[in-house]
């Protein structure tokens, strides 16, 4: 028993850190209560908490949620006509999604990268020819669903994806649509 | 045993484990046919080819269906927590799993309670969660691309989606990002960084770089990072020191890409077919102790 305790001390979890959790903030308490019920009904592990000092907007309660699944959760809220004020990481509520895009022109093909996700189209046909990067399990799913489709006809990644990788792909998609004036 | 763990993009796919059989563009595992497109199936295919070339046991794989909802990943985490310590694993490679810090930690603790850790490799979502957990240094190898290296270099970012702009602006300064990742204790013991130039490094510095053949079209092709990770895992299992395995895998991956004469529209299955030939060139070159330039000549005429 003592041996096991010693072993565990080797890799003790960071105290007070919640790196994979996020906060959702809302205008009022009734929205918080409604969202808590909605998310729990749909199987998410969420809880209502007081907001951190950096997040003193809206009401005095926030919902803690699994950060990686942000895209899926925001889609459910949108379907229920609920718009959070903010969705931010618990450990650093001031962090913002990436705003920097890298574009690479391969001649016939154009690639845009947002964070860890790359989306490439054929400039002539506007077909999505490849999706690369990323690490969440919706990336292979998004690639299977979108590669081969013309970008204007394809569903936006935010409609199919569930995670922050899916969200990053959505940003790359929007940037490509902007660059192609689609 | 070489153990490979990841997901396939199909919510109806059950949790299965065993030795996958490679057949054309498919893997077969416990009666399930899995198309090799990208992600963990591409990693398994590449690793299987290396094992065959080295004459060592084929990898043992754990797969579950997951399209990003996390259900399959959670099943895998629970299954691994309960049984991973009983496996006779020499190398474990974790791949496309939904990042979940608590479940990750429980799997790691299960491994630690057994005693000596196997060689631990993490890529994709599992690399993200390993960094998030604060236990990155427990891992032997991460295989980030440049964007993911920026994420490792950013102490605050919980996911590449939140990497801060001033760090992303440093992407041309790869050595600086490497230093930052190690100083923040957000790197594995060794990093294999995938890019126009591949870097193999530890906290002590850059051990090797690989930049030939230069195949620009590989960057947009989904799955080329997965094949690279699969190869380095199998070469490590085959007895090569990690840094040497990473260097050999980087060369072989580039050669396989070059042999496929890709465009940005090429799919990774076309490149996977070229791995045996590229790998043979690398293994022959390594056995003969020849320099990379000689190796490139041989492969070019092979």
Image (cartoon, coloured by chain):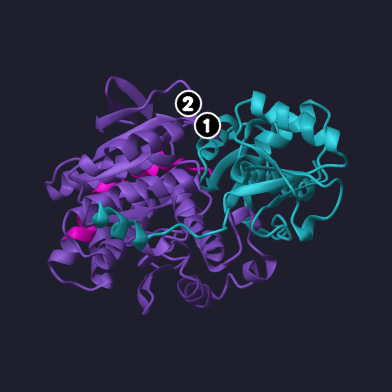
Chain colours: A cyan, B purple
Q: Position of residue B283 (x, y in %)?
A: 19, 59
Q: Disc 1 marks which residue?
A: B67
Which region is colored magenta?
B265-283
Q: Which mark is residue B8?
A: none
> In which quadrant will I find the N terminus of chain B?
top left
Q: Number of labelled discs?
A: 2
For residue B300, side relative to residue B37 (left or right):
left
Q: Which mark is residue B10?
A: 2
Q: Quadrant of residue B8?
A: top left
Q: Is residue B39 visible?
A: yes
Q: Is residue B277 magenta?
A: yes
Front residue of B170 and A81 = A81
Q: Quadrant of residue B166?
A: bottom right
Label 1: which secondary element:
loop
Q: Are marks 2 and 1 in contact (CB under 8 Å)?
A: yes
Q: Position of residue B229 (x, y in %)?
A: 35, 52
N-terminal label among 2 and 1:
2
User: Is A53 rendered above or below residue B68?
Assistant: below
Report the chain holding disc 2. Answer: B
Q: Position of residue B50 (x, y in %)?
A: 22, 48
Q: Position of residue A5 (x, y in %)?
A: 31, 56
How would you rate the neighbour count of disc 2 (Cα within 10 Å): few for under 14, some for 14-19, many for 20 or more? Answer: some
For residue B108, side relative to residue A124 (left or right):
left
Instruction: Identify which residue is drawn at 41% across, 49% down.
Output: B105
How would you rate the neighbour count of disc 1 (Cα within 10 Å): few for under 14, some for 14-19, many for 20 or more? Answer: many
């Amino acid at each position: 028993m003592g041996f096991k305790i010693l072993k565990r001390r080797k890799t003790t979890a960071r105290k007070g850190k919640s790196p994979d959790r996020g906060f959702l903030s809302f205008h009022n308490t009734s929205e918080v209560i409604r969202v808590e019920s909605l998310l729990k009904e749909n199987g998410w592990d969420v809880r209502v908490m007081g907001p951190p000092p950096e997040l003193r907007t809206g009401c005095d309660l926030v919902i803690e949620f699994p950060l990686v699944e942000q895209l899926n959760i925001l889609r459910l809220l949108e379907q229920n006509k609920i718009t959070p004020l903010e969705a931010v990481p618990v450990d650093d509520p001031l962090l913002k999604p990436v705003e920097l895009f890298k574009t690479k022109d391969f001649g016939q093909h154009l690639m845009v990268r947002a964070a860890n996700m790359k989306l490439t189209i054929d400039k002539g046909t506007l077909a999505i020819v490849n999706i690369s990067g990323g690490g969440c399990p919706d990336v292979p799913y998004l690639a299977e669903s979108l590669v081969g489709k013309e970008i204007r006809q394809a569903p936006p990644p935010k409609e199919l994806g569930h995670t922050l990788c899916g969200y990053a792909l959505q940003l790359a998609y929007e940037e490509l649509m902007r660059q192609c004036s689609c | 045993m070489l153990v490979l763990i990841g997901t396939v993009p199909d919510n109806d796919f059950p949790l299965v484990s065993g030795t996958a059989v490679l057949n054309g563009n498919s893997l077969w595992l416990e009666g399930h046919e899995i198309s090799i497109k990208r992600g963990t199936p591409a990693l398994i295919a590449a690793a299987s080819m290396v094992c065959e070339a080295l004459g060592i046991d084929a990898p043992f794989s754990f797969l579950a269906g997951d399209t990003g909802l996390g259900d399959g990943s959670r099943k895998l985490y629970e299954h691994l927590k309960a049984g991973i310590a009983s496996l006779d694993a020499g190398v474990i490679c974790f791949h496309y799993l939904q990042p979940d810090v608590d479940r990750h930690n429980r799997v790691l603790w299960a491994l630690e309670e057994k005693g000596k850790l196997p060689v631990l490799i993490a890529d994709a979502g599992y690399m993200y969660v390993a960094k998030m957990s604060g236990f990155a240094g427990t891992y032997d190898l991460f295989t980030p691309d440049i964007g993911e290296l920026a994420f490792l270099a950013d102490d605050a970012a919980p996911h590449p989606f939140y990497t801060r702009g001033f760090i992303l602006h440093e992407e041309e300064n790869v050595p600086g990002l490497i230093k930052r990742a190690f100083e923040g204790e957000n790197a594995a013991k060794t990093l294999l960084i995938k890019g126009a130039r591949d870097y193999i490094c530890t906290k002590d510095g850059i051990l090797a770089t690989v930049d030939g053949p230069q195949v620009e079209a590989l960057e947009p092709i989904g799955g080329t990072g997965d094949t690279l990770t699969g190869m380095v895992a199998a070469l490590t299992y085959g007895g090569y020191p990690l840094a040497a395995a990473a260097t050999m895998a980087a060369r072989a991956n580039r050669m396989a890409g070059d042999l496929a004469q890709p465009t940005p529209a090429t799919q990774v299955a076309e490149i996977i077919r070229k791995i045996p030939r590229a790998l043979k060139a690398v293994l022959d070159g390594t056995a003969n102790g020849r320099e990379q330039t000689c190796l490139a000549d041989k492969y070019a005429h092979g």
